[in-house]
Amino acid sequence: MQLAKILHVEDDESIRIIVEMALVDLSGFTLCACESGVEAIAQVEQFAPDLILLDAMMPGMDGLQTLVKLRGKDSCRQTPVVFMTARIQQAEKQQYFDAGAVAVIEKPFEATQLGDELAAIYQRYLLTLTPTNLE
Amino acid sequence: MDVLSSRSPKFWTFLICLMFGLLVIVAAFSANQVRSQQFASSYENMFRQDLQVMLRAQTGLTQQALLTVNLLKEHQQLTQILTDAAKIGQNADSAASLQAAREELHQIIQPYWQYLQQQGVKLLHFHLAPNAFTLYRAHRPDFHSDILADVRPLVMAVLRSAQPQTGLEVGRHGLGLRAVVPLMVDGKVIAAIEVGYGLAGLIKVEQNPLAAAESVENNMALLLHKSLLPVMTTELRESFNLETQTSWLSEDTLLNQTKLLSLLPQRIEKPMFMLLESESKQFLVSLQPWAQFDQTAAENRVVLLSWHDMTNIAQQRASNDLFIYMIWLVILVVGVLLVFFISNKLQTSTAAMLTEQQRDLRWSQQKLNALFELSPDAILLNRLSDGVYLDANPAMTQLTGYSFDELKKLSYFDLTPQVYAQQEQEQLRLLHETGRYGPYRKQYRHKNGELVDIELRGVKFLSPTGEEMIWSTISDRREVMKLDRLKQDFISTVSHELRTPLTSVNGSLDLLLSGAAGDLPAKAQKLLAIAVKNNKRLITLVNDLLDMEKLSQGKLAFKPEHINSQSLLQNAIEHNLPFAELHNVSLRLGQNVDVALYIDSDRIQQVLTNLISNAAKFSPQESDILIHSELKPHALRIAVTDQGRGLTAEQISKLFSRFSQLDNTANREQPGSGLGLAISREIMLQSGGQIGVESEVGVGSTFWIELPLAEKPEQAAQSKRILVIEDDADTAFTLKELLGAAGYFADVAHELKQAWLLLQQRHYDLITLDLNLNGESGTEFFLKIRDSAEFSKIPVLVISAYIEQGKLLLNAIAHTIDWLEKPVNTDMLTTKIEYLLSQSRTKLTSARILHVEDDEDIVAIMQMQLEPKFHYHQAGTLAEARAKLRSNRYDLVLLDIGLPDGNGWQLIPDLQLSHAKVPVIVFSAQDVSVNQRNQATAVFGKTKVEPTALVEQIGQMLGVK
């Protein structure tokens, strides 16, 4: 299984554009960019992403809240989630892992490396799944 | 000084006066003694003189008598007549011859006799031997021829001894002074001549010349004892005053006028003197008995008396005494006055000093009081023994909301939440050991229920009464905490707000440079590269600033883990390879050792990255960077050696301080915040390690770090520490060995006090306990552990020879406990310990539940279900529940409403006070109002809910599946 569809949730437009260029133009993924958690929740069923890239700090519904809501969607229960955060405190990072994140990418990130990084994360995630989970 | 000053000054003045008075009295008395002795000796001298005079008078009289009689003896005719008369004999035939001799004698004697009588002679006898036959009596010539052998001892003595004799004679025939001389023919006494003087006027006659020679006051008299009356002649009787009632008779009129005679002793055996007083006159009386020839009485009945009128002398002496006593009195009075004066002076000066001291004291009190009142920090005085509040300043009221009076009524844990019990213990220990505690941070519960962050510190001291006291200062940390939170928010905001735009910039530049937006002209690329490099520098700076901030605040949590040094170095190299390649240098792993470390590998990696990237930045192109390690005592040294330009000593000294980038001109082009080494140093210090550099200019530098080695690396990861409480040294040793062999660390305590100390100093995973410890009760110790907040979760393995008894005592108690009988079976020991440890692990994740319930059946059911998962405690009454809530910390309370001593709802205020956020599940058969329901976390009806469901609910609340 290869990583193909990524749902990106990010309130900062600049970063959305950069991520889009990095993931679509450079790496060739299919991307659905959402500017808020609400939009993501609206989009996720239809888009059915392989991986969700979630900004941690967002006005209104933040990353963690968004994750909880996303998990409520049937199609989204198992989808790996990668958090992106500008806060590098260890405790905070741990909080995302505890909430079920498979990886945390620190901002600022290397735009040119982002596609490769997510692909690698996705591969690692697949390895952790047991055959029954894979079905 | 304290003892002295505890008495009043008056007391001391009085005492000194008293002592001085005594001294004066003793001195006066001694002086008087001396003077009395002087007087006495002067009296004695006088007495001796009197004695001399009296003796002389006595001797004079007897000599005179003897002289007279000797003169008669020299008369030839007389002696011839007497010789013839002796020859004649004394028979009847010879009477005529004797008469002839007698007449012859008469013829011769009469002329003398006239003369002798004028001389005071009263008597002249001629006696014949051997029987004192009276041949002739001059005063009575017609009275003769009687034989006087029996009545004239003096005469008989002379006739027998042939020696002349003089002396007083008291005989039947009279009383007088006699002198007798013997008449010898052919060596044989044939007769004796006797001369006698009367006693009347005897002394008077003699007195005058002597008295004139001695002293006008000197008087002498002859005393006769009254018993002599029968032998006294008429003349004597007339001469001596017989009217007196006294024993002694005197012819002296002066003497008779005084009462002196009545004062004399009955018997006068030897010369003596006495001071006598009569009619306000004082006399010195000397007495000299006159030896007598007496047929009837042994005592001296004739005494010579001499007396002096001492009245004048005595008066003088008395007036002298008075004068001297006056002088002593004056000395006494002056002395006492002096003492009073000095003491008064001293008192006033002491009083002056005292008032000065008091003033100083008051002043210093005022100063301190003002500080005490003004201090923004709360100041608290407690008694150490019971923690009672003795004093508190207004700041304390402000801090806690309680007035001092209210405060005095509070118990310690009314103010301090129970969760701090363990820390309180620790601080108390510190206080006992060092005399100080703190600074340490905790919370107070304000009167309004709010928790207040505070920092305390205190010092122990002794009150004047010897009680141990604690002064504590308590600073309100609410403001600090608020600032802290603000700062944290700020850091968080900065990290977010700075990084988000940096992310965009970085991403855009990255993409541009990578050609994602199409090819760019060379010039644009060059400019972009500059932008990228500086942007990266900005990112590093933000990161480093945040790191530095957190490090210096001690907020960067270190999570040590076990890692081998080899993998640490390999990771470091791998991680830094891209950067090294960028700078065209190669990273090489040099000589190294592989040891176990217990460190926060992320942090150490950060340090190594910093060192390696520095080395890469400052190394010449295509040079090597060597990463190597070696063992140092208790530490591993990891070094990064480059072949750069090296550092001067001056440069090294500034190297580890903030924002130090060397050689501004040359190195500013190298991206870096200048915080890297400062952060590294901080990380190393906080990891218990060190950082340093050795460098030689032109050769290169070696930056090194030293990391502490993990102890017993293979075991440390899973080894548990066990406390062995066993009084028998052999058993304890065996247990320690057995446990050591099984991979545990074991500490041994031989007595309970030691065990308790160890428990407070170290974390133990398990305790083995002997129940009978040299008289100390292991059972009680077990209960102490179980009831303590901090040790109650430690499982206990009782190792005893009497486990059945122990089980009886302890079995009802819910605690992780197991039993092992002595002698110890090794397999059983390890099995039981492993089991207990696994039990405690599951329990450690679980919580403490207090079940307030009086129904035994429900208790049994709930205990059965809850005990395997939680620490289950039970209380049957409200009182019991309150006691347990005070001394223990619970994570959940399961509450019945109908209780023997009240209503379960009554416990809610207690719970809010000590267990504010602890969930309360009401499990009751009673109906519950809406209002009541809101006070509990959950309410379950006893009939409506199965116990298993309740247990599940509890599990969910406490986060246990």
Image: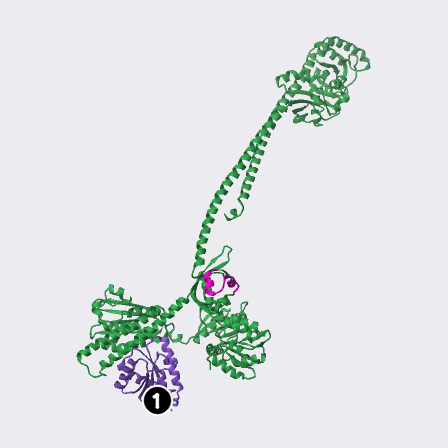
Query: What element does badge 1 sit on?
Result: loop
The chain letter under disc 1 is A
Q: Position of residue B721 (x, y in %)?
A: 44, 73
Locate residue B728 relative to residue B686 in the image: left or right. right
Count of marks placed on residues: 1
Locate residue B874 relative to residue B267 in the image: left or right. left
Q: Quadrant of residue A59?
A: bottom left
Q: Main secondary structure of the magenta part?
A: helix
Q: What amino acid does circle 1 point to? A: Ala
Q: Is residue A71 visible?
A: yes
Q: Quadrant of residue B292?
A: top right
Locate residue B36 relative to residue A129 in the image: left or right. right
**Residue toward you, A76 or B958:** A76
Q: Position of residue B226 (x, y in %)?
A: 74, 24
Q: Position of residue B902 (x, y in %)?
A: 58, 74
How has the structure been colored for display?
by chain
Q: Position of residue A75 (x, y in %)?
A: 38, 89
Q: Which chain is purple?
A: A
Q: Which residue is mark 1?
A: A48
Q: Which range is magenta?
A: B392-410
At 54% from the left and 71% from the top, the residue drawn is B882
| Placement of B671 over or under B512, stated as above or below | above
Colour of chain B in the image: green
- Residue extending farthest bottom: A135
Q: Is residue B594 visible?
A: no
